[in-house]
Image (cartoon, rainbow, N blue to C red):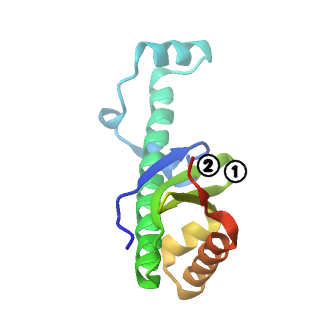
Amino acid sequence: MATQDFRVHVSGGTVSLDAWRQAMDAAESDLPKLSEAQIEAAHKVGMEEKAYARGILAEIIAENRQQEIGKRLGQIITEFLNRQGREWELSSLVRRGIHCIWIARFEASGRAGEVEIPLELADDVVDSEDPFSKGRLENLLLSTLENSAIRRAS
């Protein structure tokens, strides 16, 4: 049976309009302290340090939100695998923002597989948990894993 021992990685394209607004509305005391390299970068591009810090805060807020989405998506996938009695275990979820996908990586008895989940579908499943979106995700998982996506791990 699948467990909930999986990793979540977030890569590229995470800052949303909501994260940006939160960072813009944050008190100055909530802004992250910039490193020397960040201060230098702000000066090179002609930005005030506080504005640069708000950009960094927006990235932090957005990445934390994506981590939360990844954890919830992984829980939903794990629950599905448990209900199905599948031997596959979710080992990691990788958000590739630039490609607009989550990559779910699975392992089972020395075999490995991957399923690419569109960001829009993942968001629908996590945010609304409506049965139609969950059904689409479950069908995607089953069809991909059962159609030779599982290969021997090397």
Query: At which x and y percent is residue 51?
Result: 50, 29
The foreground one among 98 and 77 is 77
Query: At which x and y percent is residue 140?
Result: 64, 74
Residue positioned 42% across, 84% down in the render: 83
Residue 42 visible in rendering: yes
Q: Separation of disc 1 and disc 2 at Cα?
A: 5 Å
Query: At which x and y percent is residue 138?
Result: 57, 79
Quadrant of the rendered image containing residue 41: top right
Q: Is residue 45 above or below residue 30?
A: above
Q: Secondary structure at mark 2?
A: strand
Q: Is residue 117 left or right of residue 6?
A: right
Q: Give me the disc on residue 9.
A: none
Residue 117 visible in rendering: no
Residue positioned 56% across, 47% down in the render: 14
Residue positioned 44% across, 54% down in the render: 65
The foreground one among 63 and 81 is 81
Q: Is residue 24 above or below residue 122?
A: above
Q: Secondary structure at mark 1?
A: helix
Q: Give me the disc on residue 96.
A: 2
Instruction: Name the quarter where the N terminus is drawn.
Output: bottom left
Q: Is residue 146 above or below residue 92?
A: below
Q: Is residue 130 left or right of residue 22?
A: right
**Cβ atoms under marks 1 and 2 closer than 8 Å:** yes
- Mark 2 Cα-neighbour bin, 10 Å: few <14, some 14–19, many ≥20: some
The foreground one among 25 and 32 is 32
Which residue does the numbered mark 1 point to in the structure image?
99
The foreground one among 7 and 36 is 7
